[in-house]
Each structure stands twice: as structure tokens, then as C-alpha cells.
Image (cartoon, rainbow, N blue to C red):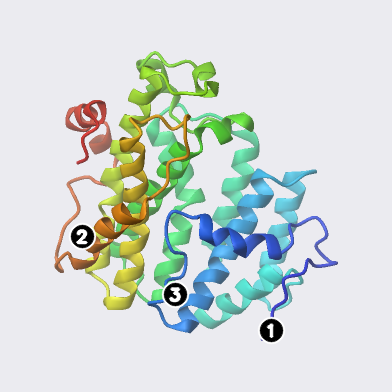
């Protein structure tokens, strides 16, 4: 099947495909590693295209975003029948059919963007994790389906990793999110450290905001460590892909720490040397490596040890 990158006359409100796939290079991790078979790379890019299209509708589209998300949901239903008209949806429809993918993760991603239109603050870290179950975890579940490796144990570890990656992205985008009147730093943590919402608009992060960022970074790092046992449980080429996902998030956190947790003064990104070091550690971990106790729960993230690590900038 041949796919074009033009927009669809039947979906005039949705972003054109040409604007979607080029964004893969700006992610914290390789979306479709060349270490993977070509057919797998094609399917991973199809999933990425859907997720990015959905986020672009929810984040940057003009007009009635809720109406566009409803249109996207309709296109998803059509894609599952092989009848989609938008090029991105045609491509993901082919992957859904070839891999017999469940549709619920796709619906969850759309629902997360609906939530973004009405929920602009999260009171606690648990609340934020609940949002990530819709906005991030479905992608990891679909990736495991494509790898043919979606066991309950791996799905639980993948959920940790995806939530961690989403939290990292929120830390990187504090200023950008504020421009849309969205704050993904838990309000309870901001209050506890004496950080006002207005402080998020400053050109540099003050001490209170840096403490909050350090706390959330420690939580994200603990979640991302689940990528090590997840990767270790997989065959070599999927292992390399998962190791790269986790390493990208870890390397981005390394850069946030190197910036003194000031995510306002500059854009923190995974640096090549840090990425390579994190990737090697994840890739070479022996089979049977275990995640830290309660890695995927806010109980661990909010424990005294994690809080002390966050305040000191230490990495669990």
C-alpha cells in the first residue's frame, strides 16, 4: 500500500500528514530504531503518527479541538475497517489490521487530549499518573503488541516507563505548557515548596521551582528504571528499542540535573554521551534484573528517601 503525505479532503480540519512524521526527530528517544526489522519500523512509525496527530489536534490545532478530536475518533473507527481517508489514519489502519491491535489504546490517547481541553491542573502526583494512563501508557502497550511481547508483567513495566517519559516531557515543557494555561507539576508539590504559579513564567527557575522539578525528576527516574528489567526480558532487537526509550528519558533527566533543575532558562535535552551511557547500561543488564520496589507507585515516589534524593539532586 502506498501512502501520501497530503491532507485529506474528507478531513480538512485535521493537520496534514507532512507535518506529523517530521517531528519524530525531536523526541527524547529514537522512535523506530534502525536496529529493528523494516516491517516493525513501519508499524512503530504508524503508531507514532497517530499519537503525534492526536497530540497536535489537542495542543496546537485552531478551531474547535473537541470537534476535531471527535472527527479523529470517527477516522479511527473507519481506519479499523480499512476505510480511513486521512493518510496518517490509513497508515495506522494498515498496522491495526496487520498486527491485530486492540483499539482501546488509541481511544485512550484521544480521550487524554479531550481531558487536556478541560483539565488544566493536577492536584497530586497520583492525579498526574492517572492522566498518564491515558496520555502515555497506551503507546507502550501498542509497542509491546507490535513486538509480540505483551505479557502482564511487561505491560506493568511498560506503564512505568511511559509514565516516566511523560513526566520528563512535562518537566521539559513547563514554560511551553504554561502558555496554554496548563500546569502538569502537581499543585500540592508547588504549594509545599512555596512555589507560585506565576513563578513558572519567570525567565529562570527560582529555588522553590527547582525543588519541585527535582522531586518530580526523582519520581520519573524511578519509574524509568523499570525499562531495565523490561528490556532484559526481551529478545535482542526489541531489547535495544526499549533500552533506547528508557535511556532517552534518563539522559534528559541527567541534563535537567546538570542544569540545576532550572527548566526555564534553557531547553533540557538528552545529550549524546549521556544517552549512550544510559543505553549501554539498560541494554547490557542481565535477564532477571528487577525494578526497584514499588517503582510504579507514588508511594515510592513520595517516600522520605525519594524526597531526600530529589532535594539533593541525587538519582535513585
Compared across the picture, whether 209 is left or right of 110 comes to: left
Q: Does any portion of residue 100 appear in the rendered image?
A: no
Choose between 206 and 31: the one closer to the eye: 206
Q: Quadrant of residue 214?
A: top left
Residue 117 image offset from top left, x and y in percent: 65, 38
Counting residues from the start of the chain, the first of labels 1 and 3 encountered is 1
Q: Residue at x 30, y 63 (%)?
A: 243
Q: Residue at x 34, y 65 (%)?
A: 242
Checking the image for residue 281, the label placed there is 2
- Alpha carbon distance from label 2 to label 1: 39 Å
* Badge count: 3
Q: Residue at x 36, y 18 (%)?
A: 207
Neighbor class of circle 2 (other Cα within 10 Å; few <14, some 14-19, many 20+) is some
Position of 266 relative to 198 (above/below): below
Neighbor class of circle 1 (other Cα within 10 Å; few <14, some 14-19, many 20+) is few
Q: Quadrant of the N terminus?
A: bottom right
Position of 84 relative to 259 (above/below): below
Residue 257 image offset from top left, x and y in percent: 31, 36
Choose between 206 and 9: the one closer to the eye: 206
Compared across the picture, whether 305 is left or right of 141 comes to: left
Compared across the picture, whether 137 is left or right of 304 comes to: right
Choose between 194 and 288: the one closer to the eye: 194
Q: Residue furthest right?
A: 9
Q: Secondary structure at mark 1?
A: loop
Counting residues from the start of the chain, the first of labels 3 and 2 encountered is 3
Q: Secondary structure at mark 2?
A: helix
Q: Quadrant of the C terminus?
A: top left
- Alpha carbon distance from label 3 to label 2: 24 Å
Position of 310 relative to 198 (above/below): below
In the picture of the structure, the residue carrying the numbered disc 3 is 146
Checking the image for residue 2, the label placed there is 1
Amino acid at each position: 500500500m502506498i501512502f501520501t503525505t497530503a491532507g485529506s479532503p474528507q478531513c480538512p480540519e485535521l493537520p496534514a500528514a507532512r507535518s506529523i512524521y517530521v517531528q519524530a526527530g525531536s523526541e527524547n528517544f529514537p522512535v523506530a530504531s534502525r536496529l529493528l526489522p523494516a516491517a516493525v519500523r513501519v508499524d512503530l512509525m504508524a503508531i507514532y503518527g497517530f499519537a503525534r496527530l492526536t497530540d497536535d489536534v489537542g495542543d496546537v490545532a485552531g478551531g474547535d479541538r473537541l470537534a476535531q478530536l471527535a472527527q479523529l475518533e470517527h477516522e479511527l473507527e473507519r481506519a479499523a475497517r480499512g476505510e480511513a481517508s486521512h493518510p496518517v489514519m490509513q497508515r495506522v489502519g494498515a498496522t491495526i489490521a496487520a498486527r491485530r491491535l486492540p483499539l482501546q489504546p488509541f481511544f485512550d490517547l484521544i480521550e487524554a487530549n479531550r481531558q487536556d481541553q478541560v483539565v488544566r491542573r493536577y492536584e497530586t502526583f497520583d492525579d498526574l499518573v492517572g492522566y498518564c494512563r491515558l496520555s502515555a501508557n497506551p503507546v507502550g502497550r501498542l509497542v509491546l503488541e507490535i513486538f509480540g511481547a505483551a505479557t502482564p508483567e511487561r505491560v506493568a513495566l511498560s506503564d512505568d516507563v511511559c509514565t516516566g517519559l511523560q513526566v520528563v516531557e512535562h518537566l521539559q515543557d513547563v514554560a511551553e505548557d504554561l502558555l496554554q494555561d496548563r500546569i502538569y507539576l502537581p499543585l500540592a508539590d508547588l504549594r509545599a515548596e512555596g512555589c507560585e504559579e506565576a513563578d513558572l513564567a519567570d525567565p529562570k527557575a527560582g529555588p522553590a521551582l527547582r525543588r519541585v522539578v527535582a522531586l518530580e525528576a526523582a519520581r520519573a527516574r524511578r519509574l524509568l528504571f523499570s525499562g531495565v528489567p523490561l528490556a532484559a526480558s526481551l529478545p535482542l532487537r526489541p531489547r535495544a528499542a526499549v533500552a533506547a526509550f528508557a535511556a532517552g528519558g534518563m539522559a534528559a533527566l541527567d541534563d535537567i540535573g546538570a542544569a540545576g533543575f532550572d527548566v526555564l532558562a534553557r531547553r533540557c535535552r538528552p545529550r549524546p554521551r549521556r544517552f549512550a551511557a544510559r543505553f549501554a547500561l539498560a541494554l547490557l543488564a542481565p535477564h532477571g534484573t528487577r525494578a526497584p520496589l514499588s517503582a510504579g507507585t507514588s508511594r515510592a515516589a513520595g517516600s522520605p528517601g525519594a524526597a531526600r534524593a530529589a532535594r539533593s539532586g541525587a538519582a535513585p
